[in-house]
Amino acid sequence: MKKILALALSVGALFAFEYATAKKETINITRDYVANVYSPKQVMVATRLMGYIKSMPVEEGDVVKKGQLLFEVDPADIYSMLNQARGAVLQAKSGVLMAEMAYADALKDYERFKNLYKNGAVSKRDFEKMTLMKNIRKKQVDMAKGMLKQAEAGLARAEAQLKYAKVTSPIDGVVTMKMKKVAEMALPGYPVVVLSDIHVLKAKSTVKESDIDKFKIGMPVNIYVPALKKSFPAEVSTIIPAGDNMTHSFVIKYTFENHQGLLPGMYAKAKIVVGKKEAVVVPFSALTTRAGIVGVFVNDNGVARFVPVKQVGQVGDNIAVTGLVGGEEVILYPPANLEDGQKIEEQ
């Protein structure tokens, strides 16, 4: 057993380690706040018709294009109105034809009585009666044509109502809420679908009143979106001065430099710099654990010494820690069998 242990120690001593120097630096003190991505431009899409929803081919979270079908209202009642309007137009056209025929007859009688009156064959009274009849028939033609215009306008409204049965998206956006389902009644003016414009996105956080002094208009913010595993540069654009009376919290809004790839409703973290401090920075690969304690191994004149450290922040691919003074030579990728006090080969 002693021979095996001695052999293990000998192999460990011959292992070629990689080293890095722990550096003392001034690092940013950051704080994370829960945030969510949202669109300041929301559109509540309603129908102009009252009727049952016939179809709704979109779901919450779907990205839609301008002009894409959102839902369709059953147009059964509109077809009835349309048929009535078409019937009214036919009746009005028939009325115009009959009035024009009556006017044509009255005009002929007028011309005939006019010649007879000139020749003294009829009295002035009879000629005036015929003139009055001609004028009445002319007004009846005008009235019939007016009724035809009203009927055609009614038909146009009915046809327009039929067009409103299919409701399309007014913008490029994402469906954030469905207020109704298929077979439910849609009412004019009441939203059925809520859309968010994906071309204008912001983020916002709700922070405690004790943290409100950490935010300033225009200060840079790093918005990290876990779903995309990506950070987006932004800045504080709005600090709403009125807090919630119950939770004593305030809303902070952020404006992105570029939000390509983001969608409304995404969970995010807003990272802001709240100060600076002195810390020792080591590569992430130097960290290890022994007996549940986080630490690093340093090269102490050819002997590996385990030094417990506490992580205080991240600087790129490095970790800021306390527990080191700076200048130490730390071992990178320490093997699991490396122990405190074990001799190592110096490079």
Image: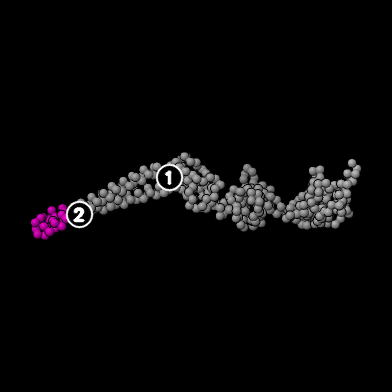
Task: Tell me the residue at 40%/42% (across/down).
Answer: 76
The foreground one among 67 and 303 is 303
> In this figure, which residue is indicated by the disc labeled 2?
104
Q: Does 29 lie within the magenta span?
A: no
Front position in the image: 33 or 91: 91
Give the side of residue 281 with respect to residue 213, left or right: right
Q: What x and y, as percent, mark residue 151?
A: 32, 49
Residue indicated by mark 1: 49
Please report the bounds of the magenta region as a residue range.
Answer: 105-132
Q: Residues within 10 Å of mark 1 (few under 14, many from 20)?
A: many
Q: Amino acid at mark 1?
A: Leu
Task: Tally the marks.
Answer: 2
Q: Is residue 202 something one can see in this rendering?
A: no
* Location of residue 27 (image quadrant): bottom right
Q: Main secondary structure of the magenta part?
A: helix
Residue drawn at x 53%, y 49% as measured from the top left: 195
Q: Does the segment drawn in magenta span residue 130?
A: yes
Q: Which residue occupies 47% across, 43% down? A: 55
Mark 2 vs mark 1: which is more N-terminal? Answer: 1
